[in-house]
Structure formats: structure tokens, C-alpha cells
Amino acid sequence: MRIIAGSKARASLLSPRDFATRPITDRVKEAVFAILEGHISGVQVMDLFCGTGSLGLEALSRGAGYALMVEKGRDAVKRLKKNIAKLNFQDRTTVIQADAFKYVADGLPKADDKNAEECQFHLAFVDPPYALSRQATVDSKLGLLLTGLGDHLMDKAVAVVRHERRVELRRCYGHLHHSDRREYGSMAVTFLEKIVAR
């Protein structure tokens, strides 16, 4: 794993120790950030199910202003913190060790870092375990997370969801509306945009 572009380009990252998390490949990560080009500089990012931080840290390297990183696994969090320290991003990140489904359902509870509660998020990465993302109905765990997530995103914000290719996300979850889908081998990435009716 490595940072592909930006201020920390080519820096190596610690990978997850086991298969509980699935690090995104450099090829797919590069393709995702090519689509997001122009939507990174200065933004506030939420990285859910972040593992050891590949997506959130890539966003920071490319100019994002702040990243809230949420990961349940204890070992992954330890390695995430080491990656953050290696890149010297401690002042631009908050790490929350929590189940992301519950974290969003609870309304993003207050973190030690006051920035986490004051953030207006412009970009969210959502990369749940495949077993928990195979159901994508509105009342599924993933559907409820995406609907709730919309309440914490700015208008026109983008949520990037990685899932199995065979899974088809709905056209909308609350204020989040389908805007694009790309397929890479056995995986797919769906882009949702927050649109508030006026």
C-alpha cells in the first residue's frame, strides 16, 4: 500500500495484518481519485470502515483539509495511527475506534478532537465488509447508514461506496442520489451525491 499522489506521493503505508479488512488496490484508488479530481482541495473528509487509512490519507495528501477516520478493528486502528504519524497528519485527522454503522446511527457522537464535531463534510468514503453490504435496500444496514450519512454531509457532497460488483445500490438513500458507478474486476464503486430539494 502506498500514497499515489500529492504531498506524500510514493510514501508506503502499513497494510492490514489480516483479511478482516480489504485494502483497495492502487489501480482502483487511482481511478477513484481521478473521478474525484477537483473535489478534494481543502475539503473535510469522512472515511468509514477506513482500515489502515488508504483512502482518507490519500485525500489528505492530495490537499483535503481534514479527515475523520472511523474503524472498528483494534489492530487496524493501531496501524492507522502509525500511518498518520509517519505522514505527519496528526493535526489534520481524528481517529474514532467504533462500529461505523452504530457511529452514524448515533449521530456521530462527540469525539475528543473538537474538529470532529464541528466538521461540515464534503466527501465520505464508505467501504464496509462485503458481507454487510450485500443487502442494499433502504432498511438494510448499509441503506440505513447511507440515509443517515446524508444528514452529516454538505449539499453537493459526494459519498463513495465500495462493494461487490453484483450488488446494485438504489437510486437514492434519503438525500443521497446515485451519480455514477464504475466496475473493477469483482468490485464496484458507486458515487452518490447529496442533493437537497429546494
Image (cartoon, helix red, strand yellow):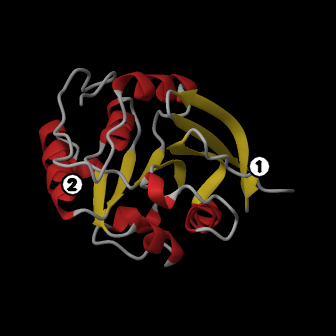
Q: Is residue 126 above or below residue 151?
A: above
What residue is drawn where x is 62% and y is 40%? 191
Question: Whole-percent x and y of residue 89?
Answer: 23, 44
Q: Is residue 167 left or right of residue 24?
A: right
Question: Whole-percent x and y of residue 187?
Answer: 50, 36
Q: Is residue 114 left or right of residue 73?
A: right
What residue is drawn where x is 72% and y is 44%? 178
Q: Which residue is mark 1?
A: 171
Hey, which quadrant is residue 140 in on the image? bottom right
Give, as a three-letter code, the residue at label 1.
Arg
Question: Whole-percent x and y of residue 117?
Answer: 43, 68
As rendered, which of 186 and 72 lies closer to the eye?
Answer: 186
Q: Secondary structure at mark 1?
A: loop
Category of crowding for the residue at label 1, using alpha-carbon neighbours closer than 10 angstroms: few (below 14), some (14–19), many (at least 20) = few
As rendered, which of 55 and 45 lies closer to the eye?
Answer: 55
Please state the total of marks drawn on the protein image. 2
Quadrant, the N terminus? top left
Q: Residue 133, which numbered label?
A: none
Question: Whole-percent x and y of residue 34?
Answer: 51, 22
Q: Is residue 55 above or below residue 198?
A: above
Farthest residue in the right direction? 198
Q: Is residue 158 above or below residue 105?
A: above
Q: Secondary structure at mark 2?
A: helix
What residue is drawn where x is 48% and y is 28%? 33
As rendered, which of 84 and 138 lies closer to the eye?
Answer: 138
Q: Are marks 1 and 2 in contact (CB under 8 Å)?
A: no
Quadrant, the C terminus? bottom right
Give, as a three-letter code, the residue at label 2.
Ala
What residue is drawn where x is 33% and y is 23%? 6
Q: Residue 76, which numbered label?
A: 2
Label 1 vs label 2: CA separation? 32 Å
